[in-house]
Image: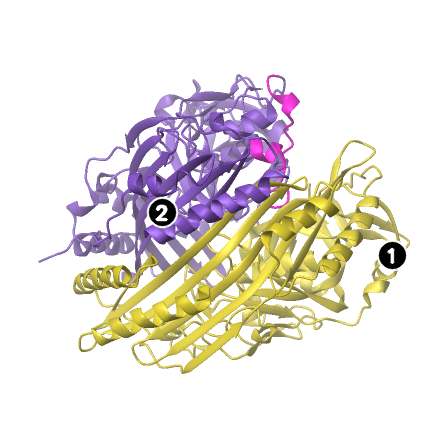
Chain colours: A yellow, B purple
Amino acid sequence: MSFQTETHDNFDFLADALFAELLAGEELNLSLSAEHQDYVRFNNSKVRQATAVWQNNLTLILQHAGRKTAATFDLSGNQHQNLQMLRSILRHARQELRELPEDPYLAPMQNHGRSENNSLGQLPTTADVVACIAEHTAGTGFTGLFAAGPQIRAARNSTGLDHWFSTESFFMDYSLFTTNAAGEAKAVKNLYADRAWNQQGFLKSLQDNKQHLDLLQGPSLSMTPGSYRVYLAPAAVTELINMFSWGAVSFYAWKNGNCALHELISGAKSLSAKFNLKENFKLALTPLFNSLGELPPSELSIIEQGQLKNLLISSRSAQEYTAISNAAEAGGGSNEYLRSVVLEPGNLPENQVLENLHTGLYISNLHYLNWSDMQNARITGMTRYACFRVENGKIIAPIKDLRFDDSLYSLFGSALEALTRESYVSPAIDTYHIRALGGCKTPGALVDAMRFTL
Amino acid sequence: MSGTLIIRPEFPEFDVYQALSWIQTEADWIGLRFVQEQAYQRHVRNQHPQNNAISITRGVMVEAMIDGCLAYAGSSDLSKSGIHKAALRAAQLARLGAAGNIFNFSEKHRPKAQGNFAGVFSESFDSQSLAEFTDQLIAACRHLQVSSRIVNACAEAQLVEAWNHYVSSNGTDIHQQWLLVSQNYSATAQDGTETQQRSMSGPVARCRQAGLELFDFTAIHADCQRIGQEALALLDADNCPAETLDLILAPDQMLMQIHESIGHPLELDRILGDERNYAGWSFVTPADFGRLQYGSKHMNVTFDPTVAGQFASYAFDDCGNPAVREYLIKDGLLLRGLGSLESQDRLGLPGVANFRAANWNRAPIDRMANINLEPGDSSLNEMIAGVERGVYMTANKSWSIDDYRHKFQFGCEYARMIENGKLTKVVKNPNYRGVTTPFWNALRKVGNRDEREIFGTPYCGKGEPSQIIRVGHASPPCLFSGIEVFGGSP
C-alpha cells in the first residue's frame, strides 16, 4: 500500500472515530500534514548528509461554547495507538475549554465541501541522483539539497468538510562555485524542480550554470554606495515579493498597525501601474483549501495597476473586524500570508534586458531581507551570487556584494521601469520541520534607481 | 476542579533499549535518538484569548554508519516495524553515500558516552491552572494598555517540556531533559498614520530553562506598564539621526549582534561550505584561528552550555560529545570555532560540543548553544557619562547580514540620545549598520558582571533540510565608537 493510501485510510479512520464521539455543541477540525521524503545534502559534489523522514503531523482544533483550543501531535504507524492518544488529547482539550475565557473572535466551523486531488510524480531514485551528481558535477563545487517524495495536506471537520491533497515532486536547490582571479569565491544559483525527473533537462540547466560561472572569473568590482539603475532577475524579484507575506497585504496586520503598505491601502501612495500581484492557485503548487479546509477563490487580485484590490483576510480576522473572509491562511502571528503568488509579467523581452539596462547593475539574487522602516515599506538586504556591473549594454565585471535599503514604493513604484515578458515558477523549497508547498511566479524587473548603502 | 497548564497524554510505551536491540546489527554502527517535546502556547491579545495550542512531537532518528558514511532516517512510527523500516532506510542511504562520502567517519565521531542532564527549575508547569495563568496574561495586557492609543497588546508564553534519550551500538546512553520558557509582551501604539511597537526586550528574547518561577507577574505587570508608556513616547519622538556616533547597545540587542556576527560566522560547517547554498559561507577562514584580531581587547566570547538556566544548556551534544565551556575569542583574538567532532576532524581544528538536531526528524549539524560576551569592568552609567554625543539602543526589531557574515544592518525598537554624558530625548526607528570585524574592533567598553543579562531565541534557523533551534546569549551593555546610525524615512 502506498504512503498516500495508507495515510488516507488512517486519517479517515481517526476522523470518523473522533467525530462519532463528540458531545453536543462541540466542533472538531482535524488537519494533516504528512510526508515521506528523502533529503540529500551535497557539498562539493559529495554527499554530506542523507536523511529519510516519515512523518504525519495531525492538528486537532476543538471549539465549544465560544472557546477554542488546538493540539498537534505526530501520528505513529499504529491506528489504535493513535486513536488512544487522540482520545486522551481530546479529554484534555475539553478540560482546557472549561478553563479558558470566551473567545469573541472565534469563527464557527463550516462545511466547505469535499475534494480529493492526488498527483503522482515520476521521481528519480535517490541512488540515481547521487550517481548523477557524482558523474556530472565534478569541479563545479556543486553544493545543495535534493528533496523528493510524497507530500500530503488534508482537512476534515465535524460539519462534513473533507478535503484531501497529495502530490509527489522533487527539487534540487543548488549552487556552483568558482574562485576568481583575485582569489574570491563566486557562485551561481539554480533550482531544478518538477514532478517528473528529466535527466537531460537537469544536465542542460547545469551546463547553462557552468557557462555563467565563466562570467565570474574576472576580479570583482567594489561599487561605492549610492543609487544605481538595476535589473533584478526573477529570483531577486521573488525575494522582494516574499516580503509581501511579512504583513504587507495582511488585513490583520493592517488593523493592528503593522502593515508595511498602509499608505497603499489608504490611497496616500501607489505602486507602479505596471505592478499587478495576485494569489493564483492555478499554479497547482499547493491545495486550494487552507489548513481549516476553507476555500479561497482560485484567483484573487491583490494589487492591480499599482492600486490595492484586496487584502488577505482569514476567517478569524473577518470575525474580529466584521469583514468578509477570503479564506486566507494566517501564520503564527495571525498575519495572513500569500501561498501561491503571481506577479504578472510585463513586455520587456528577456533578451533585451542588458540593452535596456544600458549602464547599471545586473542582480541575480537577493539575500536576508528584512524591514528597515516598515511604516515606509523600506527593506534592507544583500545582493548575492552572480551580480554584475553592466556598461553600455555589456557585462563588464562581477561586483562585490552590496547592501541595499530602499522602499517598495520606489522599487515597485516610481522607479519600476519594466517587467520582463517571461516569468518563472519557483516552487517553495522551505523545509523547516516539514517540506513546504506553494510558491510563486515572477518576472524580472528593470528599476531605474535602487539605493545601496554599504 | 481546575486542570493544570500541561497535558499528560496516554503515550504508548516506547523502550529505547529494546528498539536499539531490534536494529543494532543493520550497520557497522547504529545510533538511536528518541525525542519527545510538548510545547504549550498561551497567547492573550487585548485581554482575549488569541491562541491556546499544544504541540507534541515524538519520534526517533536512526543513524547508521556503513563504510565510513553516516546516514539518517527519522520516523514517528515507533512500532517495531516502523523502527525496522527506519533502520533499513538509514542503512540504504549510508551504503549509497559511502562511494561519494564527504569524509570517512568512524566511531570516534560517535564516542561512547553515558550520563544524564536535567535543566534547573523550581516550580513545575503543573503548579498552576490554565485559568490562573490565563488570568495573569490578561492582566499583563491590561497593564500594556496604558492609553487608548495602544491599539494592540499581546502577552504570550511558550512552555516546553523536552526529553532526549540517545543510545548507540557502542554503548552510548545519554538521557537529557529540560523545562523551557519563552515569553513575549508587546504594545503597539498608533496615532494617525504613525505606529510604533515596543516589547519587553524584543520579540521572544526572554527565553530560559526554567519552570513557572520565571513568571513573577508582579514584576512583569510593572514592566508591561513601562513598555506601554515607551510605545507612546515613540509616537511623539523624532527619528534617530543619520550620523556616525558612539553607540551603546543594551544586552537585549547585544544578543542579536553576538548571534549574527559572532555565532554564525564561527560555525565550522559554514567554513567548510556545507551551508553555502543556503544560509551562507563565512568570511572566517581556517587560517584565521589563533591569528585574526576579531575585535578589541575588551572582547571575550565563550561557548558555554554549562550556565545553569540559560536557554541552550546541556551536558552532551547529539553525537555524545560532553559539553564544556570554551573561549572562542579572548582579548579580541579568535581562538576556536563552533564545530562538532565531525567538523573538527574535517578541518583539523579544535571545536566544541555543538552537534545539535532541532528535533527527532532532523540530523545534527553545527549549531550555537549559549554564546556569551563575558563581562568587563565598566558600567552603563560610566559608559553614558563618557559619551559626548551618541545613541543608546535597545531591543531588536530588524536584522540582516550578508552570506559571509560581513555587512550587517540592525534595527531596534527604542533609543535615546546621549548628549554631553547624559541620556536625553527618545528617538524612534533607530538603526545601525557596519562590517563585522571593524565593528567589534570599535568595542570600547563592556559592562560588568552585575549588568550582564541572559537572553536567547527559540528561532535560530539553518541547515538543509532546515532546522530551527534554541540558542542562548548573555551580555552586559557595550559601547562602540564611530558607528553609522540612522532612522526611518521622514
Q: Amino acid at mark 1?
A: His
Q: Residues within 10 Å of mark 1 (few under 14, many from 20)?
A: some
Q: Residues within 10 Å of mark 2 (few under 14, many from 20)?
A: many
Which residues are drawn in magenta?
A: B268-290
How many marks do you count on the picture?
Answer: 2
Q: Badge 2 sits on which subunit?
A: B
Farthest-out residue, left: B1
Residue marked by disc 1: A358
**Residue drawn at point x = 30 percent, y = 27 percent:** B115
The residue identified by callout 2 is: B227
Residue B139, compared with residue B241, is above or below; it is below
Q: Is residue B278 magenta?
A: yes
Three-letter code for the amino acid on which mark 2 is drawn: Ile
Using the image as rendered, state which of residue A417 and residue A389 is in the foreground. A389
Visible residue check, residue B78: no
Q: Quadrant of residue A107?
A: bottom left
* Residue A66 rendering spot, x and y as whole percentages: 24, 72
- Circle 1/circle 2 CB separation < 8 Å: no
In the image shown, does B393 or B286 lie closer to the viewer?
A: B286
Q: Quadrant of residue A282?
A: bottom right
Q: Residue A111 versus residue A314: which sits nearer the camera?
A: A111
Q: Is residue B123 left or right of residue A125?
A: left
